[in-house]
Image (spheres, grey):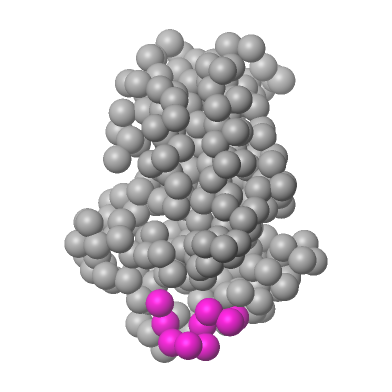
Amino acid sequence: MEHFFSIIGGMGTIATESYVRLINSRVKIKCDQDYLNYILVNDAQIPDRTAYIKDHTQPDFFPALRSDVLSQAQLKPDFFVMPCNTAHYYYNELASLTDVPFLHMMRIAIHNFIDNYPNEKKIGLIATEGSIYDHLYADELSKVGRQVEFGGPEIQPLVNELIYKNIKEKGIVDAQLFYKILQLMHDKYGCHVILLGCTELSLAQEKASDHPYNVIDPQSIIADVTIDVALKIRQGIEPQQALKKYMY
């Protein structure tokens, strides 16, 4: 297979499925051959990211990711994409394993926020406790001069319920709970834009987008970037050139 990319997924599986569904549905097709070429590594056995980030006595998820990246690198994909926000905790270590370019979902999403909301100096963030605990998004936003609003103590338990109790455990999206979280972030904490810092939240947005709030959805954004880059490479543009504006 020529001109393909590798997806490091399975964190969690239905969130990865959402990403794949987005790229398949958004690419313009007239025949089977118009779809993108990719290899999906749905490694559902990767240890819990948040558990390790908060407590290093828990199983480290890096070895599994390292193995997946190295095995895929041998196949020489044009680029890697990893549709999991919290796993970007190890982005630098993973990207250094190979010369294959590795898209950074968080940075791409943040630059999308800056481009589309240049006058907004603050963004609300809802995410896993791991992403928040280790300042994964907060640090990236600080680099570009933006502030983060996490909301009050009532927000994270609601987010955890949506991510873990609903989506990960039951495979369902509680639309009303999702709307409640967005409404609180907007009305109570003054967030005109809210960043969905977990791919389970991106799944919620895919399934329950009928709301009035402005969101930055990294998974949706990286799906569009994936399509743009893959099609440019297919048209004969060198991978490094096709990826250039996205390698922040």
Where the C terminus falls, by quadrant?
top left
Residue ID at (66%, 35%): 41
Task: List x then y, in percent, for residue 178.
Answer: 61, 74
Task: List x then y, in percent, for residue 201.
Answer: 58, 63
Task: List x then y, in percent, for residue 183.
Answer: 50, 81
From the viewer's perspective, tell me whether residue 92 is left or right of residue 226: left
Seen as rendered, the residue at the extreme right is 170
Where the N terminus falls, by quadrant?
top right
Residue 186 can be seen, yes or no: no
Q: Up-down: is 213 above or below 9?
A: below
Residue ID at (40%, 22%): 99
Q: Quadrant of residue 244?
A: top left
Whether the magenta-drawn stretch holds residue 36 is answered as: no
Seen as rendered, the residue at the extreme front is 57
Residue ID at (31%, 56%): 140
Q: Up-down: is 149 above or below 220?
A: below
The magenta span reads 150-158
The answer to which of 23 and 58 lies nearer the viewer is: 58
Residue ID at (53%, 17%): 76
The answer to which of 157 and 108 lies nearer the viewer is: 157
Residue 65 can be seen, yes or no: yes
Q: How many numbered discs, if any?
A: 0
The answer to which of 110 and 98 lies nearer the viewer is: 98
Q: Up-down: is 165 above or below 79?
A: below
Task: List x then y, in percent, for residue 116.
Answer: 32, 55
From the viewer's perspective, tell me whether residue 181 is left or right of residue 208: left
